[in-house]
Image: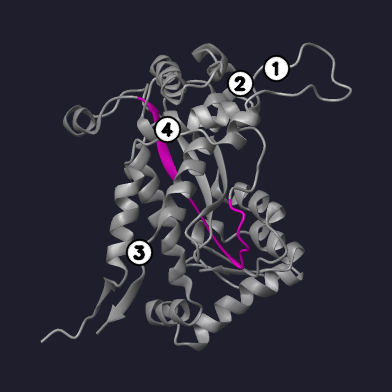
């Protein structure tokens, strides 16, 4: 007889309501959004100012991401929205939205406003163009099949995306990790990541920030003689695994004691991202793709705040 337990959702009624609310088409612009619709001239900046503010462009892109609209259909959606609201508000042309969107995804900004103590960092792939999965399985992929890499920093407590970076597929995960740590607030105490981040640069970023990296060393990892507090963190993890018996059993015990499995919440966030917005990018330019990834991450956080399941372990 199996004694294995499982997780059960304890707030299913509230969570079910939040899932229904995600599909609501009752879209409305608040008075605050209408007041921030137009841009203001920046002091000391030459040239004609933009007509629409960044908030107006971001609002348009959020609607596009949630309802999976092409740019031209997005303009029609916004026109019908202001008509139903019976307000006199100009709507940006689809070409303006496309051009202005490229500036939104350039800067690394904090997406969540909540106080964080832990951070889970991981990456996933998003398809830019290429054949579907069926064609690849039957005939193999062609040279035009291309992917981008989405790096996410997720709060395991609130399930919100704190930071996101979109890079080319050739960029290693460990090179993006220090950028997240530098931008993280001082309240962050721990970061969780897999063996791909088991590098000197990642540990050094944590040491400079003052946080603790919970990174599982690779299976063939050995003690390093490089001096510094960052290498002491890594060597300590290896010694702890060895003290717990070494091998797979030692690694398994170490992961339980360090709560390393919280790292899987980052993969859960990526699954939710792809389920809601798909695993591909509509934009073709890199700047447009960065803006698209930023907007979708922002939209996912809004949906997350509506409600999340609360699971409990049942033996």
**What kind of element bears circle 1?**
loop
Work out whether residue 83 or residue 271 is closer to the camera in this orientation and state it: 83
Identify the residue under disc 2: 100
- Quadrant in which the N terminus is drawn: bottom left
Q: Earlier in the sequence, mark 2 or mark 4?
A: 4
Mark 4, other Cα within 10 Å: few <14 / some 14–19 / many ≥20: many
| 275 left or right of 214 in image | left
Q: Which residues are magenta?
A: 112-129
| 226 left or right of 98 in image | right
Spatial CA span between label 2 and label 3:
36 Å
**What kind of element bears circle 2?**
helix
Work out whether residue 142 or residue 255 is closer to the camera in this orientation and state it: 255
Q: Residue at x 31, y 79 (%)?
A: 313
Q: Earlier in the sequence, mark 4 or mark 1?
A: 1
Spatial CA span between label 3 and label 4:
23 Å
Q: Is residue 170 visible?
A: no
Q: Is 313 drawn above or below residue 222 in the view shown?
A: below
Identify the residue under disc 4: 65
**What kind of element bears circle 3?**
loop
Answer whether labels 1 and 2 touch (C-beta < 8 Å): yes
**What kind of element bears circle 4?**
helix
Answer whether labels 3 and 4 touch (C-beta < 8 Å): no
Work out whether residue 57 or residue 86 is closer to the camera in this orientation and state it: 86
Q: Is residue 161 magenta?
A: no
Q: Earlier in the sequence, mark 2 or mark 3?
A: 2
Q: Is 244 drawn above or below residue 183 in the view shown?
A: below
Spatial CA span between label 4 and label 1:
23 Å
Identify the residue under disc 3: 309
Q: x, y (%) of residue 170?
A: 52, 37
Identify the residue under disc 1: 50
């Amino acid at each position: 007889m199996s004694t294995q337990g499982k997780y059960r959702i304890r707030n299913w009624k509230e969570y079910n309501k939040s899932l229904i609310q995600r599909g609501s088409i009752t879209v409305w612009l608040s008075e605050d959004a209408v007041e921030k619709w137009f841009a203001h001239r920046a002091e000391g900046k030459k040239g004609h100012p933009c007509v629409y503010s960044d908030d107006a462009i971001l609002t348009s892109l959020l609607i596009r991401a949630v309802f999976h609209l092409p740019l031209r259909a997005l303009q029609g959606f916004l026109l019908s929205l202001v008509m139903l609201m019976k307000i006199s508000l100009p709507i940006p042309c689809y070409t303006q939205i496309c051009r202005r969107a490229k500036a939104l995804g350039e800067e690394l900004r904090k997406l969540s406003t909540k106080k964080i103590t832990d951070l889970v960092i991981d990456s996933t792939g998003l398809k830019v163009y290429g054949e579907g999965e069926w064609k690849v399985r039957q005939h193999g992929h062609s040279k035009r099949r291309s992917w981008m890499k989405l790096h996410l920093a997720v709060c395991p407590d609130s399930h919100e995306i704190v930071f996101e970076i979109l890079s080319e597929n050739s960029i290693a995960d460990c090179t993006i990790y220090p950028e997240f740590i530098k931008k993280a607030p001082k309240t962050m105490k721990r970061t969780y990541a897999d063996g791909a981040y088991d590098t000197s640069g990642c540990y050094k970023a944590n040491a400079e920030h003052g946080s603790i990296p919970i990174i599982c060393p690779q299976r063939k990892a050995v003690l390093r003689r490089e001096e510094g507090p960052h290498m002491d963190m890594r060597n300590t993890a290896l010694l702890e695994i060895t003290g717990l018996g070494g091998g797979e059993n030692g690694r398994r015990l170490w992961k339980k004691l360090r709560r390393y499995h919280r790292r899987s919440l980052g993969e859960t966030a990526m699954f939710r991202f792809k389920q809601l917005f798909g695993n591909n990018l509509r934009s073709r330019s890199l700047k447009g793709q960065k803006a698209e990834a930023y907007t979708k991450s922002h939209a996912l956080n809004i949906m997350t705040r509506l409600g999340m399941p609360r699971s409990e372990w049942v033996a």
